[in-house]
Image (spheres, helix red, strand yellow):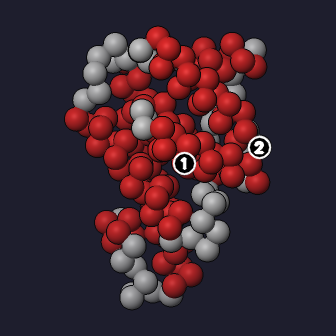
Amino acid sequence: MHYAVAGSLAPNISTNLAFAITRAFRTYLSNYHASRIHLHRVAYKHLPLTAETLTAISTIRHLARLMVEGSETPDMLPVNMLWPLLMWGCEENDQEERIWIHERISNMEKVATNAMITAQVLQEVQKRQDAYKQRVDVRQVMHDIFDSCFAIV
């Protein structure tokens, strides 16, 4: 997994296979870290971010950027990156990074039918968190905007 995440498989196997495996492991690792962020948001939402949560955010940022830079279609991330991008975006304060995340999620509309509404939810979460100066519940925002809750892969 370390070789795949680092993008070091190409010398050992075919380029196409290396690309697919690298992308799959980067997606897997991003989702693992998204779960850590989610846990903090749910269980410790009133506390500052822990070192582990900050590492999770940094890892997702790094892996997402690697996937975009190393792709033949740089605007397209796999559908399974929707959840990590949402979790990262919920904790991101930098405006440029927020724009980058929103663009990536919006561009996923071709592969994820709920990409645009996920982008809307993220923008509203960020808006409320900025206004209230505290974390808000993503599920509650979904209910407030769409009167329902939907799954994010």
Tell me: residue 64, above or below residue 83: below
**Residue at disc 2, secondary structure:** loop
> In the rendered image, is residue 136 in sight?
no
Q: Which residue lies furthest to the left in this view?
A: 51
Q: Where is residue 30 in the image (x, y as percent from the top left)?
A: 44, 49
Q: Position of residue 47 (x, y in %)?
A: 29, 17
Residue 33, quarter of the rendered image: top left
Residue underneath mark 1: 100
Identity, as a three-letter code, of the amino acid under mark 1: Trp
User: Marks 2 and 1: in contact by CB < 8 Å?
Assistant: no
The residue lying at 68 percent from left, 31 percent from top is 120
- Res 45 → quadrant: top left
Q: Is residue 16 visible?
A: yes
Residue at point 63% right, 60% down? 75
Q: Position of residue 108 (x, y in %)?
A: 68, 51
Q: In which quarter of the image is the N terminus?
A: bottom left
Name the residue type under label 2.
Thr
- Disc 2 crowd rating (10 Å Cα; few below 14, some 14-19, many 20+) is few
Q: Kindly report which numbered mark, 1 or 2, lies closer to the viewer in this rendering.
A: 1
The alpha-carbon separation of the residues under discs 1 and 2 comes to: 20 Å
Tell me the residue at 41%/44% (across/down).
32
As displayed, is residue 71 above or below residue 31? below
As drawn, is 56 to the left or to the right of 100?
Answer: left
**Residue located beneath label 2 in the image:** 113
Q: Position of residue 13 (x, y in %)?
A: 45, 86
**Image quarter of the C terminus:** top right
Residue at the far front in the pictured view: 95
Which badge, 1 or 2, is on the more N-terminal residue?
Answer: 1
| Rendered view: 78 above or below 135 | below
